[in-house]
């Protein structure tokens, strides 16, 4: 399970060091893809296999499911984690998430999100204001 948040720097070769707390569970090969809210999603190969299977089984006849499947699957890249825990995120994904010099890794149970550090701060402020309302809605459906 991935939890917590960690700030890291993009090096001069555009590599990003994964938080040491996440490396063992991720393994030596990972999948990175588009996320929602302009972040990137990082999955272990095992977790990605489960997500990809669900996405692949969505109905082709519905525009939204076709589009979302394309968004997630066509934008996914399998990559190696180097011997000291770094990854080289492709330019198209770095551009999508506006990853410049500082990034935030957020552990979110079965996945890791990579955020532009400034966007993460803004997002957290917005969510913190709405936390009570979100908890109430989750309580209505028996989640919280």
Image (cartoon, rainbow, N blue to C red):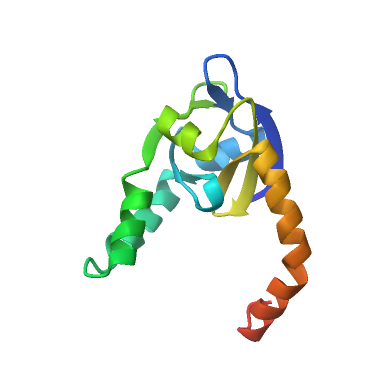
For image coordinates 55% across by 43% down, the residue present is 25
Q: Nearer the viewer, residue 53 or 26?
A: 53
Q: Is residue 85 visible?
A: no
Above or below 71: residue 18: above
Q: Furthest residue to the left?
A: 61
Report x, y in % for residue 100.
59, 27
Report x, y in % for residue 112.
57, 46
Above or below 103: residue 63: below
Above or below 34: residue 136: below
From the viewer's perspective, is 46 left or right of 141? left
Query: Quadrant of the rendered structure where residue 39 is?
Result: top right
Please count the marks in the image. 0
Report x, y in % for residue 88.
47, 25
For image coordinates 36% across by 58% down, the residue present is 68
Q: Is residue 27 visible?
A: yes
For image coordinates 27% across by 69% down, the residue present is 62
In the rendered image, the quadrant that contains the C terminus is bottom right
Report x, y in % for residue 72.
38, 50
For image coordinates 66% across by 43% down, the residue present is 119
């Amino acid at each position: 399970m991935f939890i917590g948040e960690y700030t890291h720097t993009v090096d001069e070769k555009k590599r990003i060091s994964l938080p040491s707390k996440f490396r063992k569970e991720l393994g030596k090969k990972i999948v990175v893809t588009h996320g929602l809210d302009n972040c990137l999603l990082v999955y272990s190969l095992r977790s990605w296999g489960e997500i990809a299977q669900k996405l692949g089984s969505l109905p082709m006849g519905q525009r939204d499911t076709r589009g979302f499947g394309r968004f997630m699957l066509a934008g996914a890249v399998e990559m190696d984690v180097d011997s000291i825990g770094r990854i080289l995120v492709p330019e198209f994904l770095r551009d999508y998430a506006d990853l410049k010099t500082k990034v935030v890794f957020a552990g979110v149970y079965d996945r890791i999100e990579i955020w532009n550090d400034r966007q993460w701060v803004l997002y957290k402020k917005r969510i913190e204001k709405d936390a009570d309302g979100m908890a109430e809605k989750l309580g209505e459906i028996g989640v919280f």
